[in-house]
């Protein structure tokens, strides 16, 4: 007996969360687990029947979900970043993407027997990588910084551009099916562009003139996205996806808009929608597959791995400064992700309704590319990076959550000793102060999906949670445990123990991250000392001048913070472990002003 519809829907949310959590724990793309779960629950055991459960709401739900995902993804595209990412990346997302599209379209036509127009749509969908699959795999593979930067930026830039190109290709197919190719296609593009631009301008006007209270801004943005999508479709059939893509790109590039909260909300909503969509879409797959689909999918996967990607990298890296080893690594790394799965499923549904021959192959072939590239490349990329000699060295850098005065002082001391450090915070004024001190920064919420996509952790192996927000420090330790390991997470106490209630202490114990610099050292204490003229001092230790001699010179009140060895590895004191020092290492400590009244400047501006 099949479970009730409410139970299926509730289980869908729970299972989606479990898949996302599992992906976070094993540092693999969530899409892999979501699709596999959907295949098991749907065609595998017959437990989940999406269209039967949702009835007439199934198609609108899929459409609205894809629209929100496309808006959220396209709003992260910044034209200013396109100019900054370098020639190699620009060639990869333009010439390289076209090469991949052409090769995969030809493979779909000659291997799977698709018509040329449907094969072109398949090529447009599967030429796209994406940050949601690239970022988790990069953290497991850990190639050198040049390769990681190219792959990360390629995924960020090509995600919305590829979605836009896939939508345009689909519109061309639909227009041709309607019998008025150029006129209908032109009208669809015009209406979608105008509606998207109007939707963006309306939202920008409401935000700039403060017509919306903060708690309604995300609601208004969601309402406008869905309204723009639906109205555009009403004016010109199938123009809604183009409209929300244009709306997202426009909003993301308008100056002077505070859209951080809106984008953060869209990230959380997109995570929920992605989890539900992929399970539903995979569960809807018919089993057994259409005749020849499995063999064709495997053959096209081989073409994607051994022909399309190498040719794309060769075309995109001509004239660049990458070595042949780095090019070889790039040629093996191109996992497909969210745009390919979500958009292909939606387009297949619509094209099947219109009776287009071969449309039933679109989803199985696309899923074969997604699952195949993620599984094969996640299993082989790390050994290949080591074999080619392009794996990154042991990560010794420090990610500091928070950018207040104390965090900037610690970051400056690390930076001066050539230890890689990044300050991550969503406080713009503190981040600006850090940038004025020439410290590496990342602006945004360190816990967000945006951080997962864009916060570069290459070379970073430890976390110092030093924010003035106690809850953020604790959650950051939980969030980055999978990346750094629990023995490399440290958090600074914000308030003295006397001001922490029992409930807070219990919460702290559940997180189990050691206290940075010791149990009695607090952010408030360090701020007060810096204000009083204490300074951050770094000293090279020797056999004659050890930690005891340092205390003799600077007094018992001097507070040792961390030591750095010859390999730039950082060690800190905690409430359970004393600071480790050796001759030849450098010791960084907070020392009192000189007795003669001289007040030394601290390592960070006020």
Image (cartoon, rainbow, N blue to C red):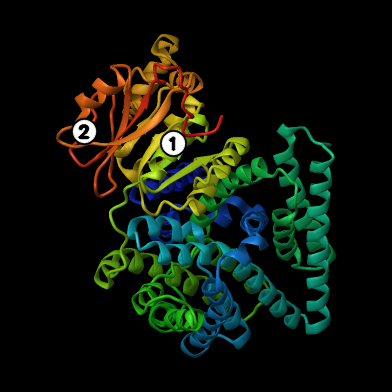
Q: Which mark is residue 580?
A: 2
Q: Residue 545, relative to residue 242: is it above or below?
A: above
Disc 1 and disc 2: Cα gap in Å?
A: 25 Å
| Residue in view at x 62 percent, y 73 percent | 352
Please, what secondary structure does the residue beneath circle 1 have?
A: helix
The image shows residue 113, relative to residue 279, as above or below, that is below
Residue 149, relative to residue 206: is it above or below? below
Mark 1 closeness class: few <14, some 14–19, many ≥20 residues within 10 Å: many
Residue 267 screen position, x and y as percent: 58, 47
Is residue 357 visible in this depiction of the protein?
Answer: no
Residue at the limit of the structure toward the bottom, as seen here = 110
Which residue is under mark 1? 476
Which numbered marker is on residue 571?
none
Q: Position of residue 343 (x, y in %)?
A: 59, 65
Is residue 64 visible in the rendered image? The answer is yes
Q: Residues within 10 Å of mark 2 (few under 14, many from 20)?
A: some
Q: Position of residue 514 (x, y in %)?
A: 31, 28
- Quarter occupied by the C terminus: top right
> Which residue: 30% across, 37% down?
486
- Identify which residue, 521 or 310, lies in the foreground: 521
Residue drawn at 62 percent across, 56 percent down:
76
- Please state which of residues 114 and 446 is positioned toward the viewer in this rendering: 446
């Amino acid at each position: 007996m099949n479970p009730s519809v409410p139970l299926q829907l509730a289980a869908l949310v729970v299972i989606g969360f479990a898949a996302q959590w599992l992906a976070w724990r094993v540092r693999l793309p969530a899409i892999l687990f979501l699709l596999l779960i959907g295949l098991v629950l749907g065609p595998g055991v017959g437990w989940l029947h999406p269209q039967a459960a949702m009835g007439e709401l199934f198609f609108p739900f899929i459409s609205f979900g894809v629209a929100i995902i496309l808006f959220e993804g396209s709003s992260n595209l910044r034209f200013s970043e396109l100019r900054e990412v370098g020639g190699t990346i620009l060639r990869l997302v333009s010439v390289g993407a076209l090469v991949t599209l052409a090769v995969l379209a030809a493979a779909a036509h000659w291997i799977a027997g698709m018509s040329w127009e449907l094969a072109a749509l398949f090529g447009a969908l599967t030429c796209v990588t994406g940050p949601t699959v690239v970022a988790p795999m990069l953290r497991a593979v850990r190639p050198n910084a040049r390769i990681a930067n190219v792959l990360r930026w390629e995924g960020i830039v090509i995600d919305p551009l590829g979605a836009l190109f896939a939508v345009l290709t689909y519109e061309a197919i639909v227009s041709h099916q309607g019998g008025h190719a150029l006129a209908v296609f032109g009208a669809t593009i015009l209406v979608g562009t105008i509606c998207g631009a109007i939707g963006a301008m309306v939202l920008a006007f409401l935000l700039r003139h403060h017509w919306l209270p903060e708690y309604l801004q995300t609601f208004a943005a969601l309402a406008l996205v869905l309204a723009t999508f639906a109205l555009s479709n009403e004016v010109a059939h199938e123009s809604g996806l183009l409209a929300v893509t244009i709306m997202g790109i426009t909003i993301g590039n308008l100056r002077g808009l505070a859209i951080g909260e809106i984008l953060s909300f869209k990230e959380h909503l997109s995570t929920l929608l992605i989890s539900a969509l992929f399970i539903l879409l995979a569960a809807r797959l018919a089993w057994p597959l259409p005749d020849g689909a499995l063999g064709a999918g495997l053959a096209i996967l081989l073409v994607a791995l051994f022909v399309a990607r190498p040719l794309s990298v060769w075309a995109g890296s001509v004239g660049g400064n990458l070595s042949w080893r780095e090019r070889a690594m790039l040629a093996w790394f191109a996992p497909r992700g969210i745009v390919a799965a979500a958009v292909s499923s939606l387009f297949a549904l619509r094209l099947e309704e219109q009776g287009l021959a071969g449309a039933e192959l679109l989803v199985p072939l696309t899923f074969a590319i997604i699952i195949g590239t993620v599984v094969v490349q996640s299993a082989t990329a790390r050994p290949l990076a080591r074999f080619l000699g392009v794996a990154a060295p042991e990560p010794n850098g420090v990610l500091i959550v928070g950018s207040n005065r104390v965090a900037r002082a610690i970051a400056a001391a690390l930076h001066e000793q050539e230890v890689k450090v990044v300050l991550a915070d969503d406080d713009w004024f503190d981040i600006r102060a850090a940038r004025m001190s020439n410290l590496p920064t990342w602006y945004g919420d360190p816990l967000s999906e945006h951080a997962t996509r864009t916060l570069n952790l290459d070379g970073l192996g430890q976390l110092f949670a030093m924010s003035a927000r106690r809850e953020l420090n604790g959650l950051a330790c939980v969030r980055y445990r999978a990346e750094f390991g629990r023995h490399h997470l440290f958090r600074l106490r914000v308030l003295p123990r006397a001001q922490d209630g029992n409930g807070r202490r219990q919460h702290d114990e559940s997180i189990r991250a050691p206290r940075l610099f010791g149990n009695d050292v607090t952010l408030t204490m360090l701020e007060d000392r810096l204000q009083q003229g204490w300074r951050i001092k770094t000293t090279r230790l020797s056999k004659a001048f050890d930690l005891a001699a340092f205390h003799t010179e600077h007094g018992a009140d001097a507070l040792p913070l961390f030591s750095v060895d010859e390999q730039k590895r950082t060690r800190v004191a905690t409430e359970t472990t004393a600071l480790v020092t050796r001759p030849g290492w450098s010791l960084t400590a907070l020392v009192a002003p000189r007795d003669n009244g001289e007040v030394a400047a601290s390592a960070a501006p006020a």
